[in-house]
Amino acid sequence: MKATASTRADGAPPYATMADPHRPDFANVTRRLLVLFALVAGLAAACGLTYSVAWQNGIDNLRSNAGARVARTTNALKSTLERYESLPYLLAEHPIVQDVLVDPSPANVARANLYLEDLNRHARATVTYIIPTNGYCVAASNWQGPGSFIGAGYQFRPYFLDAMKGGVGRFFGIGTISQAPGYYISQPVRRAGKIVGVAVVKLDLEWFQGADASEPLVVTDDHGVVFLSSMPAWKYHTIRPLTGQVADSIYQARQYAQQPIAPLPMTIERTLEGNAQIVRIGGGRYAPRYLVSRRGMGEPDWHLITMSPVSPVDADARNATIATGFGYVSLVLLAFYWRMRRARVREVMRSRALLQKAYAELNRRVAERTADLSQANERLHSEVVERTRAEQELRDAHDELIQASKLAALGQMAAGITHELNQPLAALRGFSDNTRVFLERGDHASARDNLEAIAALTERMGKITNQLKLFVGRARPRSARAPVVRALRNVVALLQKRLQGVELAFTLRDTQTQVQGEPAALDLADDHPELIAHCDDLRLEQVLINLLGNALDATAGVVQPRIVIAIEAGDKDLAISVDDNGPGIAEDVLPRLFEPFFTTKEMGQGLGLGLAISSSIARDCGGSLVARTAPDGGASFVLTLRRARASASPTPDPLTTVSRTG
């Protein structure tokens, strides 16, 4: 039979349909185009992801460094301002200052000028001066200089108006006489309960502009006006538009010497989480960009702003993207070379396959015979290695636990001594300052009382260090007794200065005699010998100082601070609660409140050991210390101790002779 035109005799396809070796394979071309498109898309995705991650990491590092820098600079500025905060108060209490305001005779004015000049030289302030109620300066430390403040009128200055209202005046502005910017702190001067004038201290803060000028740094007032800046061209500009009323008040107070206050040419490009922003200062697309970090100072109401240039982050992100692109192309070329080489090796291996078939079969059979032995050997070796590694990790963990326990004990001793001696040291400083004033006044009786108080506080500090040694060794007497009311009286005496302006109330409820009704007021003058707790008296005062100090910190920003200390006496227990009207305790903070080194305060204001030590003292005395949210808001700490029955007369109170005149 003959083959037809469409079918070959052997059944193969007709010659007209056979593949042409020179004809392009459209399937292969399509596949290669798809691979090329995928490679280009992968390159774009890798470069985009690299740029995004590198830029974000750079911004995170920049924010971290900027946050550390703004915190460091804010603390430096606040410490400088706080160092001079009490100087106007001490100046207002001095008899020479009060005499010249009551009787501005030439003799009193001359004596006040000499005193202010000497005080200003020792305090290293810029100018110290006194203003009567009429607003015209009567005495100043620069009374001999050509730019003396004597006779100048300051009725319009806010710090004068605030002090005349009985408050503390704080103000930054350009001087009307010296034309030099400065920070003013004022205090009212009282004689017989009546305000007779104002004491003012002026500080020069221009040094702050170059303290850390590695990157732009500005300080703005409560209206957003830049008054301190490491960039001189930015001074007396505002970071936000001023209302007409605010601009008029600045002009009337002559705060910036009638200088025009123009907005800083700042455009916000992006807002990041955590109130950080990326801004562009200046016009045009090539204007520099900065990462802005802000931090408020609290009192005064200033804001410190750091501006970190973003250009290094952009450059690093571009370099990382370029490196990623070159790496990606290199990997693609390497993969292509590896694929070609693998194809050549596969062709060589295919030609040798028939020759090695018999050899491979033999090897397979040998491998099957030896596989079990090899696997068993590998398992045994793995078990030996794992056991050796586990033993080494156990020894390392044991050594680390020993070292950690040593370091923890050492850290608790050092931190505990520092924390617990702060209050007696502060009291010693206050008594010593009062003693010097009493000696200058010739009040030897009050000075003698203060010296006796200093001796009592010194003895108390020695007892604190001895008790801390017992705290570390966990060996404490459990039979000690402490009068609770006397301990409260001593704590109030130690914290007397911090309690000024705070409403402090004491209540007592004895469940044995007072079953129902409101608790009665507690008089600290009465020792109440029936209120005795099983605890060392010094350690009880240590806990109460911590609780009352934390309550004072919590009510620092409250308009009408109030602290209530209540004693509820039961048959076997005494519960002492310290309640405040502060912001309270957050739910996520409450479980960790008594952990060592955990604190919600700012850096430099606490170690996070006070409540941990207090809780440990309560447990060692057979009691407990708990924290909760008060029903009316604020925080409430309840210290529960075992009640002891009154026996012999209690030990003398080491602070009964402390002078209350300080």
Image (tube, rainbow, N blue to C red):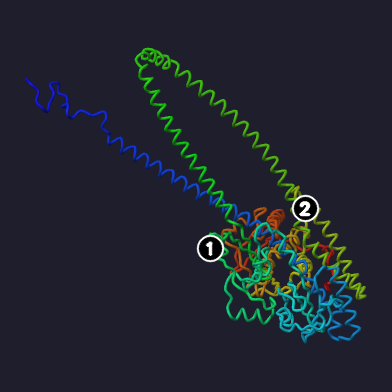
Q: Which residue is mark 1?
A: 284
Residue at 80 percent across and 62 percent down: it is 424
Image coordinates for residue 506, horizontal then vertical, percent: 71, 72
Residue at 65 percent across and 53 percent down: it is 595
Determine the secondary structure under disc 2.
Answer: helix
Residue at 9 percent across and 23 percent down: it is 3
> Badge 2, how many Cα within 10 Å: few under 14, some, many 20+?
some
Q: How many marks?
A: 2
Image coordinates for residue 38, horizontal then vertical, percent: 38, 42
Q: Is residue 503 left or right of residue 323?
A: right
Question: Which quadrant would residue 505 be assigned to in this image?
Answer: bottom right
Question: Which quadrant would residue 453 be assigned to in this image?
Answer: bottom right
Separation of marks 2 and 1 at Cα, in angstroms: 65 Å
Furthest toward the left, the residue is: 1
Q: Nearer the viewer, residue 117 or 506?
A: 117
Image coordinates for residue 468, horizontal then vertical, percent: 77, 53
Residue 468: which disc? Answer: 2
Q: Report the quarter where the C terminus lies.
A: bottom right
Numbered disc in front, either 2 or 1: 1
Q: Report the quarter where the N terminus lies.
A: top left
Earlier residue among tags 2 and 1: 1
Q: Nearer the viewer, residue 329 or 382?
A: 329
> Badge 1, how many Cα within 10 Å: few under 14, some, many 20+?
few
Residue 297: which disc? Answer: none
Mark 2 is on which residue type?
Leu
